[in-house]
Every structure is written in structure tokens, then in C-alpha cells.
Image: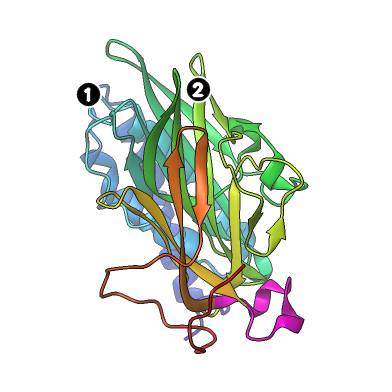
Amino acid sequence: MNPYSTYSITMIRKTFFTLTLLLTGYLGIAQEATSTVKDFIDTLNVLGKHMIEAPTEDQRREYQETFDGLLYEALLSDDAMTADFSAIRNVSSITSPDNNFRIFTYLMPLKGGRNHFYGFLLQETGKRIFEVITLEDNAYLLEEPEYKQVEADSWYGAIYYDIIKVKQGKSVYYTLLGFHPDLSNVHQKVVDVLWFEGDEPQFGASIFMIENFNDRRYYKAPQRLIMKYKNEVTASIRHEEKNKRILIDHVSPPDAALKGFYDNYGPDFTYDALIWRKKGWELETDVSITSDIITPPNNPKPKQKRN
């Protein structure tokens, strides 16, 4: 059954009753000064399910607003910096390697297959002093996002799944690996950068010593990398801590005439890697891999050396 089909009368009544109970529970939780993250999990899971499966965008937005407010309240809990959020099915939570901050991201489906992304950054700004910063998705409005350094209110939305801490002189940068799914067009994998100006998070930095990526030639140093490929396949960007690199499935079209038409791109059985060196991330192409897990190719031709 299509989860976006019209509600039956029974489902409407059930949803209204559920939402009433949720709101009652939400108010009760918010009034408890000593609440822990565990107190919020069940309610967030029910709200999150409706936020994804509700048949209209307006209904999904109503659930999202309640979900967002409740997640914010959960992040104000005394144990939010160390609590396990993995039981909340809709939310990706990752912690920086130095335990200075955590990032929480999730999405809500829009009409036509697109998604809107939401996020919070929880950081310790002093001894037992914590701050929750809202990340506001601006991905579809940014022109040439590869070159934009943005603040939290103009964030290039993605679901983050890994953080790599690097240093350049006295500066500390956190490389973020994220997924930006889009069923209306092409999926994206994002390699972004987070750094702090005082306590203020900044996204994007000129630490990529790269001239060409994903068949796009840069006219200046990019602030982030965006890999686009068709939404019917899987492509991976993952951190290999043992090999001190970020391994990338190289994606390409099945025919040279389709270069730049990313809805034709998929893994071609070759691999690239980002290597951290003194000046920043550098791209090495056609690297060897040792993993037994191989992404199925989009164009099963023999491996060829690329220029």
C-alpha cells in the first residue's frame, strides 16, 4: 500500500487521538526539569514515523514542527552530551572525535521526491555549559554551493554520518561526511567542513587542494565537495581510519556523451581517495582497495587509468 495514499476515516481518528496523547506527553516532559533523553525516545519515534508517512506535506510539516520542538527539549537534558540517541530511528547523531560537540540531523519528505533537512549542533561552551544551535537548510537556494562558506542559518543540509578532525597549523577543522538524498533528481554525497569562529559554527573552508571532482573543474578552491549520481544506485564516501584517507566510489556515466548529466552517473568500479596533507585534502585517483565489500558498478567495463 502506498503510504502517501488518502487517509481512511479510521486512520484520521487514530492519528488525531495519537497526536493528542503525544502533545499531552510532550507538555508533561517539558515541565520536568530533571528529564533525561530516554524520556523522549518513544514519543519522538511515533512523531518521526508520522512525519515520514503522513500523506500530505502539510500534515508532515505539522508533525515535523512538534518533532523538532521535542528533539530540542531532549537536547536540553542533562545527559544529552553523552546519551545514546540511536534508538530514535529518524535521527542521525554523531559526536566529534574530541567530544567537543554533537550533530543531530534528520529529513522530512517534500512533494515531488525532494527532502528538507533539519539539524542541531550541541556544544559545550564552558564547564557544564551547553548550547544548542539550530541548523537551517538552505541547500536548494545556494548558488554554486561548492564555493560558499555559510553559517548555521544557511546550512547545506545533509544527513551526517561521520566526522574527521584535522589540523592545519593552529586551525582545527572537522570534515563532515553526509548524504543528501533526492528522489526527484540525483542523490548527493557531501564532504563538508565545520570549524568555529569563537563559539559560532561555520560551514565550508578552503582546505580542498582539488581542481577537478565529479567531472566538474573548479575555478577556485572549493569550500566543500558534492558528488552527484543517479538516485537508483548506491555510491559510497567513507573514512578509512586505518589507511588515513577518505575512500570514494568514483562515479561516471556509461557513455562519454552523457558527461555532466548526473542522473546517468553511477559507480564504475574505480576508486579515488582524499588524503590529508600539510596544505589540506588532496585527491588521489585510481587508488587500490583492500575491502571485500565492493559497490556494484554502473558501467562494468575493465578498469582504465584516468588522466
Element marked by disc 1: loop
Which of the marked residues, 2 or 1, is nearer the chain's N terminus? 1
Label 2 to label 1, Cα distance in Å?
30 Å
- The answer to whether residue 96 is above or below residue 124 is below
Check disc 1 and give the amino acid type. Answer: Thr
Image height check: is 84 above or below 243? Answer: above
Pinpoint residue 252: horizontal percent, then vertical percent: 60, 75
Asked where in the image residue 75 lies, by quadrant, the reply is top left
Q: Position of residue 8 (x, y in %)?
A: 51, 78
Please provide percent x and percent y for residue 257: 76, 83
Q: Which residue is mark 1?
A: 34
Mark 2 vs 1: CB contact within 8 A: no
Q: What amino acid is labelled 2 in the image?
A: Phe
Question: Does 201 appear above or below 8?
Answer: above
Question: Residue 196: which disc?
Answer: 2
Nearest the viewer among 122 and 40 is: 122
Residue at 53% from the left image edge and 84% from the top image edge: 298
The residue at 51%/79% (across/down) is 268
